[in-house]
Amino acid sequence: MAAPVPPGAPRPGANARQQSPHPNFNPNFQTNPNSLADNMQNMNLNRPHSMPNSGPRPSPFGQPPPFPQSSVTAGFPVASPPMSRPGPPPGMVGRPAVIPAGPPQTTLPANVPPGRPVGLPVSHPPPFGSRPPPASLSSSTGGAVLPSSAFPSSGVSSASAAPPPSGARPSSFVSSSPLTGGPAGPMSRAPAGPSSNGPPAVGAGALPGAPRFPPAAIVSQPPVGPPPSMMSARAPAQAPTMRSVLGSSAVSSPQTPPLPSASSPFPAMTQARPPPLGSPYGPQTWSMQPQQGTQPPHIPGSTHAQPPRMFGMPQQALPNQAMTNIPPAMGQPGAPMSGSSKIDPNQIPRPIPNATPIVYETRHGNSANPPPPATSDYIVRDTGNCSPRYMRCTINQIPCTADLLTTSAMQLALLVQPMALPHPSEDPIQVVDFGESGPVRCSRCKGYINPFMKFIDQGRKFICNLCGFTDDTPRDYHCNLGPDGRRRDADERPELCRGTVEFVASKEYMVRDPMPAVYFFLIDVSMNGVQTGATAAACSAINQVISDLPEGTRTLVGIATFDSTIHFYNLKRALQQPLMLIVPDIQDVYTPLETDVIVQLSECRQHLELLLENIPTMFQTSTTAESCFGAAIKAAFLAMKSTGGKLLVFQSVLPSVGIGALSSREAEGRTNISASEKEAHKLLQPADKILKTMAIEFAEYQVCVDVFVTTQTYVDIASISVIPRTTGGQVYYYYPFSAVSDPAKLYNDLRWNITRPQGFEAVMRVRCSQGIQVQDYSGNFCKRIPTDVDLAGIDCDKCILVTLKHDDKLQDGSECGFQCALLYTTVYGQRRIRVTNLSLPCTNMLSNLFRSADLDTQFTCFLKQAAIEIPTCPLLQVRDHVTNLCINILLSYRKFCATVSSTGQLILPEALKLLPLYTLALIKSRGLRNDGRIDDRSFWFNYVSSLSTPLAIPLVYPRMFAIHNVDSKDGDESVLPPTIPLSSEHVCDDGIYLLENGEDALIYFGSSVDSSILQQLFGFTSVDEVPTQFVMQQFSNPLSKNFNDVVNVIRQQRCSYLRFTLCKKGDPSGMLFVSCMVEDKNANGPSYVEFLVHIHRQIQMKMS
């Protein structure tokens, strides 16, 4: 008789009996790596977009082979792999025609998915900015101090800044390119001359200002990396230093020797401990005098005595904080905010990109490491805590009491993105199969086994780190303890040494068999949709992505069209051609033939492709202007009700008839600015509850709805968006829809939607240690019980905000644990539980909270909370609330942690020194302005509701580049030019600028651009010839090639194709660009300098 196999260990013969894809099966693998033309391996960036199948294919959602089992028992499968991202080169390779029963054989290293370049991309600069890898955390609170001379009271400019001290970084903006790759120019087979850079999809890249990842490319990649000056060895990390901005001295605390770091498993990559919570974007931008160790200059009228201490205050002076002197005329409470102050805008805090990616270990020794900024470039080594891509906390030390948290005025919340894309160089998530018994869990709180559960009594019992309950260890899971008190097999079991792990779900986690992968396409064929080209664009996009759907008999598809009636299509193979079935009743809808409306893709592919080619001509002469959107999605839902799945809706006009018909609120929207401002926000609320009721039913039956709005008019997104938000989907918005420039983006968005890592019929719950509890969840989901969120669909781009509160005191020095469990079904029908663990230290010190604050996560909370308030509160109230959140945090730091008592200085905590800039950018953003269209603002706050942390800051503070002088890069230099501050002072009349926020991009032309540059880049010679609709082309000159390279890298990073809008000075389109200069004073708010003065004045008033 065979010996029993312990749970969690690989079981013999497991591969032999699998009929569904093996957990390690990589659909990207192909036997012939040279068959590029067939599977669009390399995106041909320059094919005319009319060419059939010109779009590249992304790799499907599959599993890469396991990585070398250095510390894990051989044979553990891995979870869903890093996916190729949309962005230039899209797909890795085509799917095999037959799904193999086991993992593909490959000669690559075990941790490199087939098709990926072997080895690690070296020295890719980050997309937005990152902290320098530091030494150990200092005991003092970090802080940035804007200098006394930054706000001189006279009109005389300050003395020139002294050179930075030895070891300081240059303050100029360095190139901010993230990891990139892929063909930058045309392939050798591309046609000569002007060619379109339109339809090809965005390939594997990295997300927006976040850690962006290199695509898996096979053709030669453009060399990328930091400029040579950034490649030099780092100076030794220094202890926090008080820095004065303009020529004053600085005080430094004793140097802390850098901690020895383990040898890096990533060749040529900087190995460092995570950055301390000090500067999130590198050293200060302002220059400092080289003298170290002198006393700070005496400020007239100030004393250097410490302010009165209160509970939570540090015991000694805190040397590293930022001060800004405010002239008396501006610093006095109630003083007018005059523009006479001579503040050098170059000396105030701004994000500084960091060119070197770091290797980040989630825990060092027995303590948690604070994570790098979400917008920086890093590679995670999971040493107990999860990767910050999956879960981040707003403060990386948990306050022991609710009073301490209230005093800090900061938010305590988690941002959870359970299926986020890992960096390609990171180890994949391991899959553990405990067999029929299922994973080991706490019998009281049902928490899953994790590295922070403590085993006692020689391993016979374990203590839950979440609720403190002691359980008996299952007999077949027992293992003796080593001298260090850990289980001897801890490093061989992923669930005991990794922060993130995936368990195979046993039968007890299933109320039915795992659902198949169902994709139902619903297309608006009303007169408006047909005439604007939206219907044809939708049909073309669907036709191209059919080959990207998962292979196999479990993939089912259906299609319907609608105007004032609903048209289903029987796609059964037995029929000579698809058969149209019309449903005229749009008040009491039904599905005509449930069994034949949704069929296996393998049986109906030819019929489906033929139908998609014919739909635009079938309705070409239609004069039906009405749309029965609500009735159509109800009918499609009835067809999908028995299985669940993805419903992808293409909508072009306002739903005007049938269930959930909407009346146009556009006229009211036009007058709402001049009319009652107090009532304007009501136009951002759903018109009625009919669609919400339908959405809850859809979520209950696991139907996830995505809506692609291709319109030139008002469609009431506030009402329509209720359905995708409740079902775990999203809204895509193309306004005004252009048949020239938008089909390429529509195709790329649809392709990424169905090929990105995702799951169906999911349930998520977050558990916390005793003393902390979940207060609320926020995001795109349906919540039927308080503790869980139901997700008909979940994907790698969706992020959920989890707000926390105290229900008891925590013990200083202990650790507080958080665990997110996501139960979901893969696209191949496997039921999995993804468990993500984070354990953070508790503290009684207020200064520790400010030092460990996470800027990106704190700001993302601001952003999401503002988006929640927009539909229910007047705009002025929302803006005031956001501003007060920022002021109260800085007030608390100034009052209880800062050591300087001069009233003329604005003191910012080092970790949060950019908070005022991002708060100002949020106040000026589209969602918080009252001069925008109702639909635009509705889309904005719906987009924010599921936005990931790395994309939050770029949304309100975009990146700007000069493209009129883009140079080709040699060696490891970044393809992207240096970023430019968002101020008109940095925009020249003879320049061309690209501004992108992760979703859209503007190209701005100055009034006196050189005609030869225009000719090289765009093919016209005068700014007056700037077209309203734009499709990128690559011309046969170096400048055009470099520009195309830049655009392709950005698309890779942002995982988005980006819509381009051309703007020129003196034109209404130019005002759109000017409104994005958030550091300038405009109708939407004050300048950055004025905002700092306002914050300082408010702090003074509250202090007095």
Image (cartoon, rainbow, N blue to C red):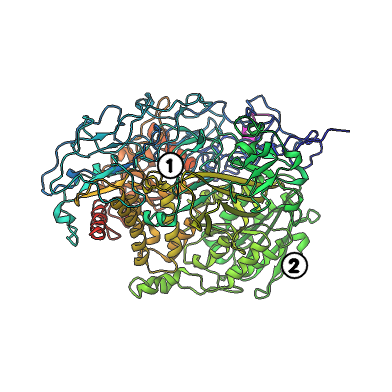
Say which residue label 2 marks: 592
Neighbours of disc 1 within 10 Å: few (<14), some (14-19), many (20+)? many
Q: Quadrant of residue 463?
A: top right
Which mark is first along the chain, 1 or 2?
A: 1
Residue interval drawn in magenta: 32-39
Please tell me which residue is depicted at 33% across the width and 58% down the height of the picture. 883
942 to 152, vertically: above or below: below
- Magenta region includes residue 444: no
Tell me if residue 715 can be seen.
no
Q: Element at badge 2? A: loop
Task: Give the quadrant of the C terminus.
Answer: bottom left
Vertically, is 57 above or below 406? above
Residue 861, how many percent across, how many down? 44, 54
Left or right of 909? Residue 108 is: right
The three-letter code of the residue at mark 1 reads: Pro
Q: In the shown orientation, is residue 546 left or right of residue 847?
A: right
Q: Residue 430 at what x, y percent from top left?
A: 64, 37
Judging depth in this view, the residue of 252 and 72 nearest the camera is 252
The image position of residue 936, as x and y in percent, is 43, 61
Q: Nearer the viewer, residue 450 or 48?
A: 450
> Is residue 310 in view?
yes
| Label 2 environment density (alpha carbons within 10 Å; few <14, some 14–19, many ≥20) | some
Write down the residue under mark 1: 373
* 401 in relation to 567, above or below: above
Percent coordinates x, y for residue 922 in the rendering: 37, 55
* Distance between the alpha carbons at the discs numbered 2 and 1: 53 Å
* Rendered image quadrant of residue 101: top right
The N terminus sits in image quarter: top right
Judging depth in this view, the residue of 799 and 748 nearest the camera is 799
Give the residue type at disc 2. Answer: Pro
